[in-house]
Image (spheres, rainbow, N blue to C red):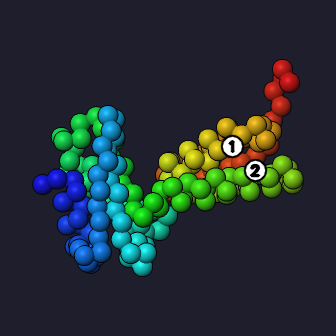
Amino acid sequence: MTIQNYLMNLCQHCGIDSEVLEVTIDEADDRIEAKITVPEEDSGLLIGFHGETLSSMQRLARVVFQEELQDKRLVLNINNYREQRAEKLQDMARSGAYRVIETGQQHIFSYLPANERYVIHTTLADDAEFSQVESVSEGEGRERVLIIRLKTPTVNE
């Protein structure tokens, strides 16, 4: 069985009609990206709350095909959700940072998965406009939060 067939079967078992389902595989040296396209009204079923179902499907596929994947990273995407979510997270990071700069009060994001925290961290770190703020993660597991706050001056500043 191929990754493509596995994902097609998994989606069909979730109730997605095979006639409206498209699964494509793009392979590079270090990663395999599986793209699933379904009608918009079916995408929520496969994506889940903040991409939790999508992440679970990706983990399942990774476990099933771990020998075939070896060192390659498997990335599963449904209707370009990952790109859309990254854009939304970048907007949230900028908005939170502006609020922190304006008010001096820290901004706390409740639980975000590691890949989403990374988007926020890099968005702020890569933009000179936000050099006076920092983003830090605190807590463990589901209690982990991301905080945007003003940087505390160091002795050398």
In the image, residue 81 lies at what x, y percent? 47, 61
Q: Look at 81% across and 35% down and name the residue there.
A: 152
Q: Amino acid at mark 2?
A: Ala
- Give the vertical position of 49 relative to 91 (above or below): below
Q: Look at 23% across and 65% down and name the residue there.
A: 8
- Give the vertical position of 75 relative to 22 (above or below): above
Q: Is residue 58 visible?
A: no
Going from the N terminus, do you reach mark 1 or mark 2 first? 2
Left or right of 24 on screen, residue 149:
right
Determine which residue is flagged by label 2.
Answer: 97
Instruction: Give the mark count.
Output: 2
State yes or no: discs 1 and 2 in contact (Cβ < 8 Å).
Answer: yes
In the image, residue 134 lies at what x, y percent? 72, 41
In the image as oriented, which residue stretches furthest toward the top? Answer: 156
Q: CA distance from mark 1 to mark 2?
A: 8 Å
Q: Is residue 20 visible?
A: yes
Left or right of 78 on screen, residue 89:
right
Determine which residue is flagged by label 1.
Answer: 124
In the image as oriented, which residue stretches furthest toward the left? Answer: 1
Q: Look at 71% across and 40% down and name the residue there.
A: 127
Q: Look at 25% across and 76% down and name the residue there.
A: 19
**Residue 16's image quarter?**
bottom left
- Give the vertical position of 58 relative to 31 (above or below): below
**Residue 153's image quarter?**
top right
Left or right of 155 on screen, residue 47:
left
Q: Mark 1: few, some, or many residues within 10 Å (few <14, many ≥20)?
A: many
Q: Amino acid at mark 1?
A: Leu
Quarter that holds the C terminus: top right
In the image, residue 27 lies at what x, y percent? 30, 43
Quarter that holds the N terminus: bottom left
Describe the element under mark 1 as helix, strand or loop. Answer: helix
